[in-house]
Image (tube, grey):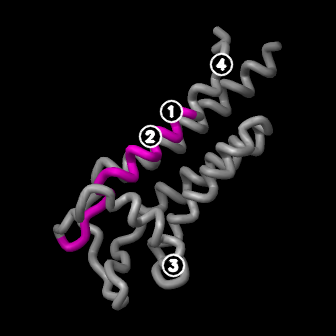
Amino acid sequence: MKLKNPNIFILVSILTFIIACSQKIYCTNGNCGEYWSGLVALISGIFGIFISGACITWLANPLILISWLTFKKTKISLVISIIALLFGLSFLFFDKIIINEAGHYGKITGYKIGFYLWNLSFIIMIIRNIISLKNKSSS
C-alpha cells in the first residue's frame, strides 16, 4: 500500500511537539512542575547542555527541526530524526538534572506526558521518512 502524501506526518510531528511543550515533562524530587514546563525547557535548555549531563538531551530539539527542514532529502531526514529520538530517549539514563539558576540538582523521579509526546514527535517523523523511502523505492 502506498500512502499518497506522507508529508502529513510532518505536520502531525510538529503539532505533537508543540503539544508536548504545553505539558509537564518530568518530576524532580517528587515535584512535577507546571504546565508549559516543556516550553521553558525548550527555551532554557541550551544553557544546560554546558552544565548538566541530562541537558545534553536538549540537542534533540535542533535535530528534529533539521529533520523537518530536510524532509525532501528523506535519507538525511531519517538519520537525523533517529538521532533526535536517541538523544530524547537518553534522558531515561540520567538520574538527576539541574533544577534552577543557582545550579542545584534534583533527582529525576518520574516522567510526564510531555516527555512521551516529545519523543513521539520524533517517532512520527521517523515513520514519515520510512514511508517516504518505501514510496520512492516502489515507484
Q: Are marks 3 and 2 in contact (CB under 8 Å)?
A: no
Q: Is residue 90 left or right of residue 21?
A: right
Q: Mark 2 — residue?
A: 16
Of the residues under marks 1 and 3, which one precedes in the sequence?
1
Q: Which residue is mark 1?
A: 12
Q: Amino acid at mark 3?
A: Phe
Does the segment drawn in magenta span residue 23?
yes
Inter-mark Cα distance, 3 to 2: 24 Å
Q: Residues within 10 Å of mark 4 (few under 14, many from 20)?
A: few
Q: Residue at x 54, y 59 (%)?
A: 87
Tag shown at residue 47: 3
Image marks 2 and 1: residues in contact by CB distance under 8 Å: yes
Q: What residue type is disc 1 on?
A: Val
Please state which amino acid type lies under the numbered disc 2. Answer: Thr
Q: Which residues are magenta?
A: 11-29
- Horizontal side of 11 relative to 20 (left or right) equals right
Give amino acid for label 4.
Answer: Asn
**How far apart in space, not on screen, are marks 4 and 2 (Cα)?**
18 Å
Quadrant, the N terminus: top right
Which residue is identified by label 4? 5
Residue shown at 33% from the left, 82% from the top = 100
Question: What secondary structure is marked by label 3?
Answer: helix
